[in-house]
Image: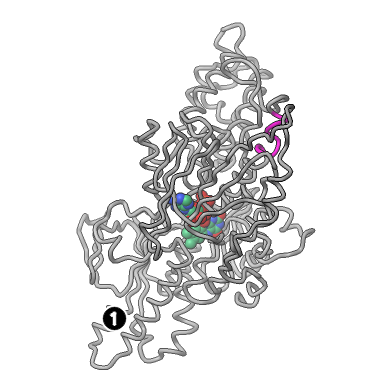
Amino acid sequence: SKLLVFSSFSGGGVLVYSDSNPLKRVLHADATLDSDGQPIRKKKVVVLGSGWSGYSFLNYLNNPNYDVQVVSPRNFFLFTPLLPSVTNGTVEARSIVEPIRGLMRKKGFEYKEAECVKIDASNKKLHCRSKEGSSLKGTTEFDMDYDILVIAVGAKPNTFNTPGVEEHAYFLKEAEDALNIRHSVIDCFERASLPNLTEEERKKILHFVVVGGGPTGVEFSAELHDFLVQDVAKIYPKVQEFTRITLLEAGDHILNMFDKRITAFAEEKFQRDGIDLKTGSMVVGVTADEISTKERETGKIVSEPYGMVVWSTGIGSRPVIRDFMQQIGQGQRRVLATDEWLRVEGCEDVYALGDTATINQRRVMEDIAAIFSKADKGKTGTLNKKDFNGVVKDICQRYPQVELYLKKNKLKNIAHLLKSANGEDTQVNIENFKQALSDVDSQMKNLPATAQVASQQGKYLAKCFNKMEKCEKKPEGPLRFRGEGRHRFQPFRYRHFGSFAPLGGEQTAAELPGDWVSIGHSSQWLWYSVYASKLNGSVIGTAVNINSTMPSGCSIRALWII
Ligand code: FAD
């Protein structure tokens, strides 16, 4: 049924359009003139990346005052949520990509298929080269300058420097990765079907190990299990009995970012399905034949033979970003830090979106302190309830993470948090409150690295750019807490629409706003609907619509399934 539903995509493969760009020429011809009749030089905006955040930014950007240039090694947008389904062939890779050239032509933007290898922020220059593996490698290096840089390069799989992972494991990040996994799974079955093998050898070849119990690892395990049950039984009946899937997770549970009910359901389902789930099992090395783990309970190192390993333990910064972070004094950080307007901290005219960056949490506490000082005019160290509520509202508006944290922990608002710190006093003691907040801070997580966040950030930034000129004159943002005046724009505000976790066997777990959890076949249909719905007026469509950030060819609505 998946195949049927998703065949409605019209992605149509990686088409490459002609380089001629009539619209762009028209835009140049119409360039606005200054008071002396001279064309005004357009600001050059360079966008790095054509993924969720970059594509969304480009899709919403409608300001003719910018000369927009895009650099990305991938000349298509990739709809990652359906990538696990490509590994077993229920969805074709060509159905989940959208060529970037179509958008470039429509918008009059320019595209270069290359990767940025160095950002020189002090001279506003980029060093780029044709993508690795290209037949042109080494021959097409070039420099570009920019007035404004938008970094949307995403992240790379994180191996935590575990020996042997780069060499022996498969990742699931790009379309090629999914196809490689698909070929490798089939290859394992073909090899295991050869004559003259011992039972042990067949078992080894057909032992599939998935590392990482996050949403991607879980979904891939479930897809693989369905494939083994539904297809392998028919195609390779003689070797089916030798197959085994092991899912390794270093923590106590899989899907630990989800509601506990979902985690428990997923663990039980995997057990029933015969997926060997090992929690508290940290991988310490991978060789060509064996994967070694350190078991938390016993402290022992255990090695097991395997046929194929898929590594899915989270993400880390790309080398170009690590290098850039060193340059701008963020070398100690894990991820590039921005402010709430998505401007890279300590850098002029550079913005960063999506998985490559995170909004700096430290600023939250500094700003909260400033909000208090401002509200506490009498310097008494206390606020009455009315002023306090105003302050809380300000904080939540400015920092969606605080609000998210409170919701997640079922605290109606910050005032609830305060109760324990402040008792029933009518005056709110600021020091107590700050203490309570810093507890929140230490537990508060960054915004999740999801398509839902990335696409909302792209849209937000494009909208800021679209009204840049107007807002330079008439700022719309909040009053600055430090210094005078207003910021030009409202800060970025994330809206969480919910999460899905497909668990295989036509069952999905859904966690939607309002503490609504649904697990089973009905959620699977909800998942299908969310992804495939074309109905503009549908409740689901309206509630979770990030469709407009989607490329036109994939006329689907999407919601983060994590
Ligand atoms: P990406 O979408 O990764 O885009 C990065 C872009 O930058 C790419 O075009 C890349 O080619 C380009 N690039 C890379 N290096 C350079 C360079 N040096 N110079 C120029 N360009 C460069 N999220 C959800 O919300 N829901 C889901 O269901 C979901 N499922 C997922 C399933 C899988 C298998 C995976 C891997 C991820 C999934 N995610 C999901 C996460 C989601 O895909 C990411 O959060 C999202 O892609 C981040 O968007 P981005 O724009 O930051 O990066």
Q: Is residue 449 left or right of residue 303?
A: right
Q: Is residue 348 visible?
A: yes
Name the main secondary structure of what is drawn in magenta: helix
Q: Nearer the viewer, residue 404 or 46?
A: 46
Q: Position of residue 165 (x, y in %)?
A: 29, 61
Q: Is residue 467 above or below residue 481?
A: below
Q: Is residue 289 left or right of residue 516?
A: left
Q: Quadrant of the N terminus?
A: bottom right
Q: Is residue 150 left or right of residue 188?
A: right
Q: Residue at x 33, y 55 (%)?
A: 159
Name the residue that disc number 1 marks.
203
Which span is picked out in magenta? 464-471
Q: Is residue 537 left or right of residue 397?
A: right
Q: Position of residue 160 (x, y in %)?
A: 31, 51
Q: Residue at x 64, y 64 (%)?
A: 531
Q: Position of residue 400 (x, y in %)?
A: 59, 36
Q: Quadrant of residue 403?
A: top right
Q: How was this image coloured?
A: one colour
Q: Is residue 464 above or below residue 522?
A: above
Amino acid type, mark 1? Lys
Question: Can you name the residue that lies furthest to the bottom here?
Answer: 195
Mark 1 burial class by Cα count in 10 Å: few <14, some 14-19, many 20+: many
- Dot 1 falls on a residue whose secondary structure is helix
Q: Residue at x 50, y 63 (%)?
A: 265
